[in-house]
Image: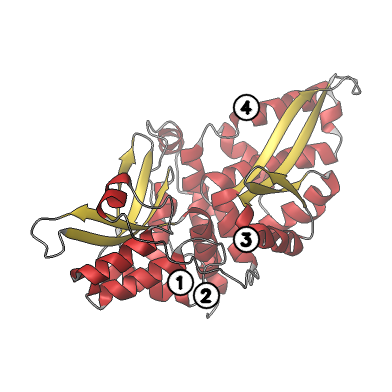
C-alpha cells in the first residue's frame, strides 16, 4: 500500500480512472506485482493502442535498425541478408503495447535476465513497420532511411545477386558500427554509401516528446551536501535529455516545444537540461501531466512531481520534509513492476484523442 499512497493523491482529473483500476486489485495481488522476481513485468492489463506520435518518438529514442549478414553456403552469393528492427527494454508491458499498436507484428522474447526484446524481421512485418513510419518519418539522425533503401533491394530480390549483396554491404558500412571484421575481410573494396541527412527535425506533436522522453529522458532527484542550508543538505531537481551531436537541431527544437531548457556539449553529445525550479514547476511538470511518459519512466515522473510539490511548499527546508524526500528518492525505482500495472490505463487514455496522420 505504501507506493500507492504516494501515487494516488498526485493524479489529476484526467487520471481518475486509476482509482477504479486500484479497486480491481486486492492487497495480495499488488504485493505480488511489486515483488516480482524479474525487473520486467508480465502484467498485461488493458493494453490499448498507443498514440502513433508516441510510438514515433519512442522509436526515435530506442529503436534499432539492423542489416544482418550471415554466411550461407546454400545461397548463390554465399550470403544471407536479413533486415531487422528491434527494441530491447526491461519493460515488457510497454513493448506489448507498441507491438499491439503496430498490428501485432514481430515477436517479444526474453533477451537477458532482466530484459526483453521486440524483434521484427519477416519481410511482411518489416513492410508494415516501414509503411507506418513513412506516415511521419523519424526525425533523429538514425539509420531508418538507409534501412529503407536496403529493404527496397530486398523486396526486388537484388539480395539474391552478388551485385545486390555489394550494394547492401555498402549500406551496412554506413549503419551503426559499420562492417564487422568478417565483412571487411570478405568485401575489402566496398565503400560506404553516403548517409542521408534528416533535414526537417520539427517536432510536430507533444506526444512525440512523451515517447522520446520515455526512452531517453531522465527525471533526476539529488540530495547534496550544502553548507548554505540550515540542514546542511539541499535538494536538486533536474530534467535531462541527451542526444548525439548530429541531432543538435533536434535538441534545440525540444527546448522550444518545452518552453525551457539549456543545451550543453557533452563529448560527442548534447545535453538538454532543465535545472531552474520555476521551469520545472511551471513548464516541465504541466507538460508531462498532459503528455504522459509510460512504464518505468512514469514512476520516475511521479516521484519527481511529488518532490517538486514538497519543495514548492518549502517542505525540503524542514527535517521532516527532507526525510520524506529522502524516502521518495530511495524508493523511486524500487517498484518498477508496479509502474506497469498502474500506467497501462494511461496507454488507453492516450488513444482517446488519436490523431489521423
Residue 63 appears in the figure: yes
User: In the depicted view, which residue is nearer to us: 66 or 32?
Assistant: 66
Q: Residues under labels 1 and 3: Cα distance?
A: 16 Å
> Which quadrant of the rendered structure holds the N terminus?
top right
- In the image: residue 227, left or right of residue 351: right
Residue 65, given in percent of the width and then of the height, sits at 40, 59
Classify mark 2: residues with Cα within 10 Å, few (<14), some (14-19) or many (20+).
Answer: few
Classify mark 4: residues with Cα within 10 Å, few (<14), some (14-19) or many (20+).
Answer: few
Residue 176, given in percent of the width and then of the height, sits at 44, 53
Residue drawn 22% across the image and 75% down it: 157
Residue 171 position by quadrant: bottom left
> Mark 3 — residue?
209
> Mark 2 — residue?
136
> Mark 4 — residue?
330
Question: Which of marks 2 and 3 precedes in the sequence?
Answer: 2
> Mark 1 — residue?
133
Q: Residues under labels 4 and 3: Cα distance?
A: 27 Å
Q: Residues under labels 2 and 4: Cα distance?
A: 40 Å
Q: Nearer the viewer, mark 1 or mark 4?
A: 1
Q: Is residue 155 above or below residue 337?
A: below
Callouts 1 and 3 close, C-beta under 8 Å: no
Residue drawn 85% across the image and 25% down it: 318
- In the image: residue 162, left or right of residue 150: left
Q: Nearer the viewer, mark 2 or mark 4?
A: 2
Q: Is residue 176 above or below residue 195?
A: above
Judged from the image, the secondary structure of the residue bearing numbered disc 1 is helix
Judged from the image, the secondary structure of the residue bearing numbered disc 4 is helix
Q: Nearer the viewer, mark 4 or mark 3?
A: 3
Question: Which of marks 4 and 2 precedes in the sequence?
Answer: 2
Judged from the image, the secondary structure of the residue bearing numbered disc 3 is helix
Amino acid at each position: 500500500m505504501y507506493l500507492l499512497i504516494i501515487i494516488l493523491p498526485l493524479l489529476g482529473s484526467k487520471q481518475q480512472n486509476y482509482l477504479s483500476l486500484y479497486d480491481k486489485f486486492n492487497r495480495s495481488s499488488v504485493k505480488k506485482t511489486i515483488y516480482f522476481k524479474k525487473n520486467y513485468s508480465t502484467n498485461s492489463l488493458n493494453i490499448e493502442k498507443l498514440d502513433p506520435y508516441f510510438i514515433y518518438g519512442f522509436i526515435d529514442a530506442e529503436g534499432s535498425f539492423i542489416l544482418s549478414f550471415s554466411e550461407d553456403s546454400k545461397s548463390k552469393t554465399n550470403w544471407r541478408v536479413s533486415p531487422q528492427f528491434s527494441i530491447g527494454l526491461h519493460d515488457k508491458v510497454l513493448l506489448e503495447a507498441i507491438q499491439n499498436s503496430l498490428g501485432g507484428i514481430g515477436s517479444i522474447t526474453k533477451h537477458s535476465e532482466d530484459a526483453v526484446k521486440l524483434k521484427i524481421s519477416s519481410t511482411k512485418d518489416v513492410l508494415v513497420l516501414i509503411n507506418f513510419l513513412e506516415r511521419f518519418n523519424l526525425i533523429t539522425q538514425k539509420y531508418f532511411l538507409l534501412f529503407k533503401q536496403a529493404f527496397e533491394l530486398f523486396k526486388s530480390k537484388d539480395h539474391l545477386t552478388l551485385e545486390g549483396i555489394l550494394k547492401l554491404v555498402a549500406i551496412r558500412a554506413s549503419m551503426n558500427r559499420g562492417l564487422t571484421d568478417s565483412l571487411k575481410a570478405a568485401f575489402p573494396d566496398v565503400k560506404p554509401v553516403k548517409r542521408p541527412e534528416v533535414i526537417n527535425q520539427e517536432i510536430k506533436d507533444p506526444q512525440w516528446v512523451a515517447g522520446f522522453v520515455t526512452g531517453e529522458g531522465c527525471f533526476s532527484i539529488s540530495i547534496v551536501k550544502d553548507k548554505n542550508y540550515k540542514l546542511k543538505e539541499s535538494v536538486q531537481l533536474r530534467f535531462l535529455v541527451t542526444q548525439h551531436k548530429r541531432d543538435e537541431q533536434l535538441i534545440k527544437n525540444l527546448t522550444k516545444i518545452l518552453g525551457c531548457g539549456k543545451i550543453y556539449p557533452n563529448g560527442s553529445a548534447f545535453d538538454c537540461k532543465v535545472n531552474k525550479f520555476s521551469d520545472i514547476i511551471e513548464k516541465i511538470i504541466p507538460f508531462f501531466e498532459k503528455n504522459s511518459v509510460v512504464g518505468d519512466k512514469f514512476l520516475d515522473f511521479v516521484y519527481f512531481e511529488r518532490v517538486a510539490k514538497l519543495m514548492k511548499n518549502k517542505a525540503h527546508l524542514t527535517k521532516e520534509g527532507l526525510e520524506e524526500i529522502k524516502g521518495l528518492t530511495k524508493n523511486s525505482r524500487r517498484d518498477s513492476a508496479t509502474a506497469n500495472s498502474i500506467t497501462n490505463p494511461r496507454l488507453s487514455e492516450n488513444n482517446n484523442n488519436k490523431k489521423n496522420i
